[in-house]
Image: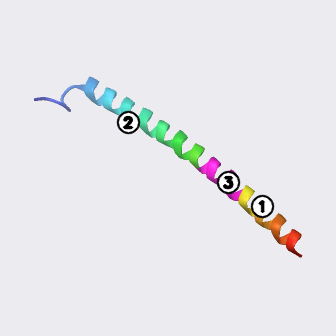
Amino acid sequence: MYFCSSGFDQKALRKGLTKMSHMLNTYLTTLFRLWWKHYISLLEFNFHNARMSL
């Protein structure tokens, strides 16, 4: 069984890895943005409550 001997397999593998890492990057960025928005809204909510209780 040959795998690395042909250049095409390496190219396809590299292409697949690049695509996968790009997808993972997009996923993580989206996740981080959602978490950040949630975090900011929580902070604003807590700040508002603290001001209301004074």
Q: Nearer the viewer, mark 1 or mark 2?
A: 1
Q: What separation in Å lies between label 1 and label 2 (alpha carbons)?
A: 42 Å
Question: Is the residue marked by circle 1 packed among few (<14), some (14-19), or many (20+) residues within 10 Å?
Answer: few
User: Along the line of sight, which residue is nearer the eye, 46 or 3?
Assistant: 46
Report the residue at 82% width, 71% height from top. 50
Report the residue at 44% width, 32% height from top. 19
User: Along the line of sight, which residue is nearer the eye, 5 or 36?
Assistant: 36
Q: Identify the residue position indicated by label 1 in the image.
A: 45
Q: Is residue 37 magenta?
A: yes
Q: Is residue 43 above or below residue 4?
A: below
Q: Which residues are magenta?
A: 32-40
Q: Identify the residue position indicated by label 3 in the image.
A: 38
Between discs 3 and 2, the one toward the N terminus? 2
Return the residue found at the far front. 53
Q: Identify the residue position indicated by label 2 in the image.
A: 17
Between discs 1 and 3, the one toward the N terminus? 3
Return the residue found at the far left. 1
The answer to whether residue 38 is left or right of residue 10 is right
Q: Are marks 1 and 3 in contact (CB under 8 Å)?
A: no
Q: Quarter holding the N terminus? A: top left
Instruction: Name the kind of residue labelled 3 in the image.
Output: His
Report the residue at 79% width, 60% height from top. 44
Q: Position of residue 20 (x, y in %)?
A: 42, 36
Q: Is residue 21 above or below residue 2?
A: below
Q: Position of residue 12 (x, y in %)?
A: 32, 26
Name the element at disc 3: helix
Q: Is residue 12 above or below residue 46?
A: above
Q: Position of residue 39 (x, y in %)?
A: 68, 58
The answer to whether residue 24 is left or right of residue 8 is right
Name the element at disc 2: helix
